[in-house]
Image (cartoon, helix red, strand yellow):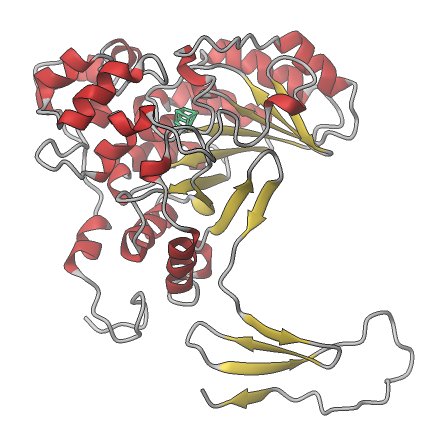
Amino acid sequence: MASNNSVGQGDDPEPAQFLELKQFHSAGRGFWSDVSETDWNDHRWQLKNRITSVAHLQRLMPLAPEEEAGAKLANTKLALAITPYFFNLIDPTDENCPIRRQVIPRIEETRAASWEMSDPCGEDSHSPVPGLVHRYPDRVLFLVTDRCAAYCRYCTRSRLVSNATGYDFHPEFDKQIEYIRNHPEIRDVLLSGGDPLLLSDEKLESLLSQLRAIPHLEFLRIGSRIPIFLPQRITPQLCAMLKKYHPLFISIHTNHPRELTTEVRDALGRLADAGIPLGNQSVLLRHVNDDPWILKALMHKLLMCRVRPYYLYQCDLITGSWHLRTSVRRGIEIMEQLRGHTTGYAIPQYVIDAPGGGGKVPINPGYVLSHNNDRVVIRNFEGRVFEYPEAVDGTPIAAPKRTCEPELVEHSS
Ligand code: SF4
C-alpha cells in the first residue's frame, strides 16, 4: 500500500509487520490455562504467582546463557518479577523478543560503563524529606512505594525499587504531605515509586484525599506501569475512587506495541471513562523499539486506547543499562521519520533527562536552518525550505517601516 502515512520516503509501502503490530490481541492464558477465570482476573492472584526466580523461569522457557547468569544475579541488583499475564507476551523461541529484553535480566546488567550512575537524575540530592523530591519550583515527586508489579531492567530508580541493594527507602507520608502543605509554590504532585497503583484502594484514597485538601495543589498525577503489567488491577472500584480526585492525570509507561493487548485496552478504557487524562512515557531501547515502524505502531495504538503519547526518553545513564541504550543520533532519526509523517497527536517529545539532575531537555531534529532579525529559515518534514518573516516584538502603535516584504517565500529544494 503506497501511503502518505508511511515512515521515511513518502512512497514506501507500509510493511506487513507494521499492520500486524497495530492489531490488539489478548495475552492469552499460556501455562495457566487451568487457573479459574476468577483467579486469573484477580490482580492479587497475579501478584502472588509472579515469576521471581531463575528456577521458575527455566521451568517456563529456555534461557540464553546471558539470561541465566543475569537472572541468578538479579536479586542483588534489581529483583526479577514478572506477572503471569505479562509473561504470556514473551516469545520463548525468540531470544531477541522485545518484551523479553525489558523484564528478563541479562549478565550485561552487572557490568557498568564508566559514565553510568546509580541516581542519574540526581533525585537523592533534592530530597527535603524522605520520599519527596523537590527539584523544580512548582512541582514535587512523591514516592509512595519501592515495589512494582514487574521490574524493568533499565529502571531509572533501580537503586531504590525492589530494595535489592538495601537502599534505605522509608517514605514518611505525614512528613511528605506536611512539606507540601507548607510550600504554597507547589501546585503539582506526581505520585510515583515504585508503582502507586500497588497500594490498596483505601491507602491510595487516604493519600489522594489528604493531598486534594491542600488548597494550593492544582492537580495530581500518578505515574504507573500497572495498566501494562497488571491490567487486572484497574478495577471499576479503583476507577470510581480515582475519579473523586480530579483533576487527576495518569502517565502510563509502555515501550512496544505488543504490550497493548485487548486486556490493556479495556483497562485504559475504564480509566478514560472515569475522566482521567492519560499520557504515555516510553523509553527508547535498543532492539526493543529503536525503529520508526515499531514506535509509529505503538503511538497509533496508544491513540486508539485514548492515551496521548507524552515523552520518549533517551535511556537514562543508569548503572548496567548500556546494552539497552541507543545512540541519540538514532533517536533523532526516528523522530524525523515520525514528525509530519503521521498525526501530530501521535508524536511524543523526545527528551534527555540531563545527567545529574538537569531536568528534561527536548531533543528535536533541526528544523530551523537560520534565524536573524529579519527572518527565520525553516525546513519541513519533506526537506522543503521556507522563509518566515520575523515579527517586531512589543506593541507597535504604527506599522514599522519594513525592510523586506513579509511574504512566504518557498525555495525549491
Ligand atoms: S515500573 Fe517504573 S519504577 Fe517499576 S521497575 Fe519499571 S520503570 Fe522502574
Is 79 placed left or right of 252 in the picture? left
Q: Residue furthest right?
A: 397
Q: Quadrant of residue 148?
A: top left
- Ligand 1's image quarter is top left
Q: Quadrant of the N terminus?
A: bottom left
Residue 275, position as x, y percentages in the image: 50, 36
Q: Quadrant of the C terminus?
A: bottom left
Residue 330, position as x, y percentages in the image: 37, 55
Please state which of residues 209 and 370 is positioned toward the viewer in this rendering.
370
Does residue 36 appear in this view? no
Is 141 placed left or right of 293 in the picture? right
Is 31 placed left or right of 261 in the picture? left
Q: Where 413 sits versus 277, above or below?
A: below
Query: What residue sits 42% from the left and 58% below the top?
Result: 335
Query: What residue sits 55% from the left and 37% below the top?
Result: 355
Query: What residue sits 15% from the left and 18% below the top?
Result: 57
Q: Where 144 sits versus 304, above or below?
A: above
Residue 405, position as x, y percentages in the image: 72, 92
Please state which of residues 164 and 87 is positioned toward the viewer in this rendering.
164
Q: Quadrant of residue 139?
A: top right
Does residue 247 appear in this view? yes
Q: Residue furthest front?
A: 114
